[in-house]
Image (cartoon, rainbow, N blue to C red):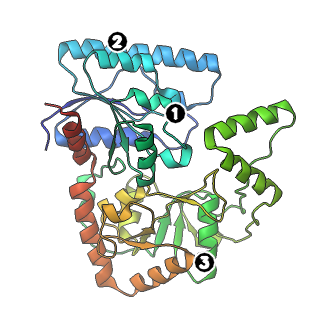
Amino acid sequence: MTRPLRIFLCCQQDLESHPIPAYRFWAGYFRSAFAEAGHACLEAPGCDWAAGLVLMSRDARTAWLESTWQRAVDWIRAEHARQPIDLFLSYLYPEQVHPGGLSEVRALGIPRVNFFCDNVRMFRRPPREFAHFDLNWVPELPALAMYRKARLPFIHAPMACWVEPKWRKPPLAESLPPTFVGTRDGQRERLFAEAYQLGLQMDLRGSSWADEPISWDSPPQGRGFGLLANQWAYARRHGLAALAQKFKQKVFPAKQLTFNFGPRTKDPCQGDEYWRVLREARISIGVNRVASPRLSAERPLLYSRLRDIEGPMVGAAYLTEYAPGLDELYEIGTEIEVYKDAAELVAKVADLEGDAARRQLLREQGQRRALAEHGIVQTIAKVSTKLGLP
């Protein structure tokens, strides 16, 4: 265990709500974990970091970067003079990074660490902006090769997660059927439609599942020079293979699903109800596939997601889609269980439904492992060691 640290946190905090996917929980996880461990969580007032993820013009982005980072650096400089800051910890996308601001933080002698958890989905190589950090916190095993190739300093550690103490013992009751909690998307739709047709018995808790079928094809593009410019930018970001796959999907689009998920859909759950559902479902089901511009709809990208930490941490009997690195986090079969396709998902759910003792073993062993090894506090201790913090 490291000594108590003074950590500056830059993690999508906002001054108002923004039209971007759920983001506020990340800062909450870090704040709570720091408080429990005795670390001081320092935040610059008046900085709307999440605003940097909103679509804006180049001039507007430049103005946002300059004003936000200047406010943050001025506050850090004054606070560091009052009492030294041990660590600058952020969760920033490339477009939120200001190299000059980070240089000023470095000049104060404060090491800079960035957590980022969508590397393999978004990038072929680490963004050049990430080279300005002293350490990159990388949770996805498949992303490590790109950081090694780029010769960027990194630490491989689990997704950042914290749960309240009241959820840290296995539940006393299994009040719900096998359940998946999460929003609907094309990859999940394909997987579950096939599994239901094979006999899967499972509830869906999330938005859009009762809606009409959705398409996972790329949206229509414009015409003329704008089209060429867009395709060139797309190829530069994702590679020529991704551009070829995009055109292939245009010429040979994936078959549209017509499966009706409505009868399997229950109310979405948030807050305490979210954790209760994960814990009290007889089986809590995870999905680790995501769409990738470089792969076809039938061959999705797989990497371990945040739910692989959240579920076991709260004592779920957790069955998730196998992804590289899961066998480093858990002992498969005794701490969590995995499936590799729709047929195996159906079979594993049926097996676990008939074995209450096995479900209890997964709850106890998985929770013990996750709480002991995969929390934010444990990762901060590893970061401290890696950076040689006193």
Quarter occupied by residue 44: top left
Quarter occupied by residue 304: bottom left
Residue 135 on image: x %, y % = 33, 35
Name the side, left or right, on which 377 lies relative to 212. Answer: left
Task: Give the Cα separation between the discs numbered 3 and 2.
Answer: 56 Å
Name the side, left or right, on which 380 lies relative to 185. Answer: left
Q: Which residue is mark 3?
A: 196
Q: Of 65 and 25, which appears nearest the observer?
A: 65
Q: Which residue is mark 2?
A: 74
Q: Residues within 10 Å of mark 3 (few under 14, many from 20)?
A: some
Q: Of 254 and 132, which appears nearest the observer?
A: 132
Say which amino acid is labelled 1: Ser
Q: Residues within 10 Å of mark 1 (few under 14, many from 20)?
A: few
* Callout 1: SS: loop
* Callout 2: SS: helix
Quarter occupied by residue 207: bottom right
Residue 121 on image: x %, y % = 54, 49
Task: Give the Cα separation between the discs numbered 1 and 2.
Answer: 25 Å
**Where is 179 relative to 102, above or below?**
below
Q: Of 308 and 124, which appears nearest the observer?
A: 124
Residue at (27% x, 72% y) in the render: 172
Which comes before the other along the chain, label 1 or label 3? 1
Q: Which residue is mark 1?
A: 17
Residue at (34% x, 51% y) in the render: 158
Task: Give the Cα separation between the discs numbered 1 and 3.
Answer: 37 Å
